[in-house]
Image (cartoon, grey):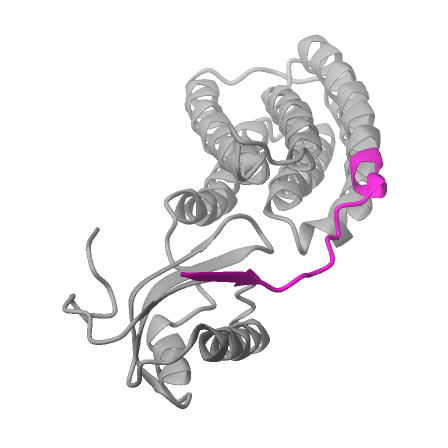
């Protein structure tokens, strides 16, 4: 059995962890201010925004810990190390987005039935401050979020919270100048629905990775057809392809040869396979079991 992998540069840097720490501190300040302001003003939207901000703090802490763990070296007890910690963090953060959204919907419906007068001036100022702080956090994490599902989960928490703060600000202005106090509950409901939408997408993506589903950018039939074009190769079969994390994609399979080749020839073919698969599909860990005249199922997918 041959195993090989393409070496690739890791983008995990100390700046990523530093940016997470800055975002954590900013959101602790926002959350504290909004809780105090929400209680004083009576604004459900402001309190809901504070609750979401608190979930941001938790998600950022989870992301920070996962980022640190992912750098730990592998061992005989943990042969992959903690490389999947960031995927687990993304799953947890996506779940909290959906849970928070459901709680907000319940609170919004209750407030619709029992509307309360709200001190809109405080709502306006605190939401404005939250927009600035959340906007800064979003800018800090944006670049890392494009290549890392863990950071993306934290980024989405912050981005949706920034949008929520914008909605709260608009609601505060409408309440101040037009006394439309029902807007507070309506905006809370809209924020919650948006949270469910973005949370579901992230939850689905992280679940697929945890369940070892084939990465979306890889078509297994295309992989098979590409490998089968190589000289002396009969058929690639019994295939498993999965993503360990954002940038590490594994393939293991059986490879039936048309000739009884030597180990040296197999090594040359394996090197050609790994180069092709990396260049076209970004698969960077390849494990091949060579076969010749072996009587086993030759289907592409075989249930183990």
Q: Where residue 43 appears, x then y in whole percent?
A: 64, 19
Q: Which of 255 and 282 is in front in this view?
A: 255
Quarter of the rendering containing residue 66: top right
Q: Where residue 294 appears, x then y in whole percent?
A: 19, 70
Q: Is residue 102 left or right of residue 73?
A: left
Q: Where residue 34 appears, x then y in whole percent?
A: 73, 19
Q: Answer whether residue 146 is magenta in the image.
A: no
Is residue 43 visible in this depiction of the protein?
A: yes
* Relative to 123, residue 259 above or below: below
Q: Which residue is drawn at 42% across and 22% down?
A: 106
Is residue 186 visible in this depiction of the protein?
A: no
* Relative to 140, residue 27 above or below: above
Q: Which residue is drawn at 43% across and 28% down?
A: 102
Q: Where residue 303 appears, x then y in whole percent?
A: 19, 54
Quarter of the rendering containing residue 258: bottom left
Q: Answer whether residue 12 is magenta in the image.
A: yes
- In the rendered image, the quadrant that contains the N terminus is bottom left
Quarter of the rendering containing residue 266: bottom left
Q: What stretch is highlighted in magenta?
A: 1-18
* Relative to 148, residue 89 above or below: above
Q: Which of 115 and 249 is in front in this view?
A: 249
Q: Nearer the viewer, residue 119 or 301?
A: 301
Q: In this view, does 30 lie to the left or right of 38?
A: right
């Amino acid at each position: 059995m041959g195993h090989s992998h393409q070496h690739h540069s890791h983008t995990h840097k100390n700046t990523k962890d530093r940016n997470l720490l800055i975002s954590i501190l900013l959101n602790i300040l926002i959350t504290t201010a909004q809780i105090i302001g929400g209680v004083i003003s009576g604004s459900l939207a402001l309190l809901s925004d504070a609750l979401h901000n608190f979930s941001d703090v938790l998600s950022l802490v989870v992301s920070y810990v996962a980022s640190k763990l992912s750098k730990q070296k592998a061992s005989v007890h943990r042969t992959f190390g903690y490389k999947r910690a960031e995927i687990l963090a993304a799953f947890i953060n996506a779940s909290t987005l959906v849970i928070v959204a459901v709680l907000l919907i319940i609170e919004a419906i209750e407030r619709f039935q029992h509307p309360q007068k709200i001190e809109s001036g405080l709502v306006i100022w605190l939401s404005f401050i939250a927009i600035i702080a959340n906007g800064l956090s979003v800018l800090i994490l944006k670049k890392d979020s494009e290549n890392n599902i863990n950071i993306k989960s934290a980024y989405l928490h912050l981005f949706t919270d920034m949008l929520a703060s914008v909605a709260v600000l608009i609601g505060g202005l409408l309440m101040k100048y037009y006394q439309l106090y029902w807007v507070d509950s309506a905006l809370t409901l809209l924020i919650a629905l948006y949270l469910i939408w973005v949370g579901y997408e992230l939850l689905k993506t992280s679940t697929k990775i945890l369940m070892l589903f084939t990465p979306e950018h890889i078509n297994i039939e295309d992989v098979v057809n590409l490998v089968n074009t190589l000289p002396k190769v009969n058929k690639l079969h019994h295939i498993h392809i999965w993503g360990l994390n954002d940038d590490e994609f594994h393939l293991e399979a059986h490879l039936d040869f048309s000739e009884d080749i030597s180990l040296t020839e197999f090594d040359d073919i394996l090197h050609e396979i790994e180069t092709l698969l990396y260049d076209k599909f970004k698969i960077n860990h390849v494990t091949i079991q060579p076969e010749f005249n072996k009587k086993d199922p030759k289907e592409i997918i075989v249930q183990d």
